Amino acid sequence: MVTSWLIAVYFYFSCSLIADADMATLTLHGVTDQLNSDNEQYASALQTCGKVFAEVETLFNDKDYESRKGWFRDEYNNEGDVVYAKDTPNGRMVTISTELPMNVDDVMKETWNGMPTLPEWNQNINFAKVIANPTPNFDVVTYGNNDVLVVSGREFVSARIWRKIGDHYILASRSVDIAGFKSEHKNKVR
């Protein structure tokens, strides 16, 4: 089965968002992520995920999104994959759609669980690691790109959340600050 797979990144990324007063609970599309007391340091990251999820849904539901009206072709390859970009007041947004010879559930499983293997297949990624996975649908990851000539590579810390909606998935992610996080990569810029 060939699956059309859509990836959208909104660098400064409204659905129904319910946040508990203590910020340790988030409900999206009828699924609740509840942080236990051992993971309360990730409450702000969880709420950030809720906000970016809503922004991504708004993007996908925009009437001009499918036609890419207002977007420009940023990159492309010989296999027909095209990266479209759009500058917004909050930063640059990029999107790509492609077809993969897998079913959508397997693609999502690999995307979610395969984070640590990014350096094995992406030559631009130096390291990748899951810092914490407080719930089955929410985690915090770190990854970094390689140094390029005299420019030091960067390290990113991101919170990710996903939901299955009908027969498709939305995975949303945004960079976050995690109190107490100590990088294992001292030469990377954060």
Image: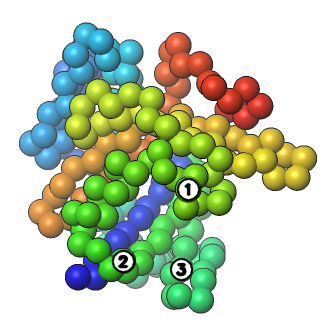
Kindly identify the amino acid type of the residue bearing the numbered disc 3. Answer: Val
What's the distance in space between the residues labelled 3 and 1, CA to CA? 23 Å
Q: Is residue 54 visible?
A: no
Kindly identify the amino acid type of the residue bearing the numbered disc 2. Answer: Leu
Reading the chain from its start, which is encountered first: label 2 or label 1? 2
Which residue is label 2 attached to?
100
Q: Nearer the viewer, residue 44 or 188?
A: 188
Which numbered disc, 3 or 2, marks the residue closer to the eye? 2
Callout 1 secondary element: helix
Which residue is label 1 attached to?
120
Seen as rendered, the residue at the extreme top is 37
What's the distance in space between the residues labelled 2 and 1, CA to CA? 19 Å
Residue 73 vertical placement versus 170 (above, below): below
Task: State yes or no: discs 3 and 2 in contact (Cβ < 8 Å).
Answer: no
Which residue is label 3 attached to?
82
Residue drawn 43% across and 62% down? 8
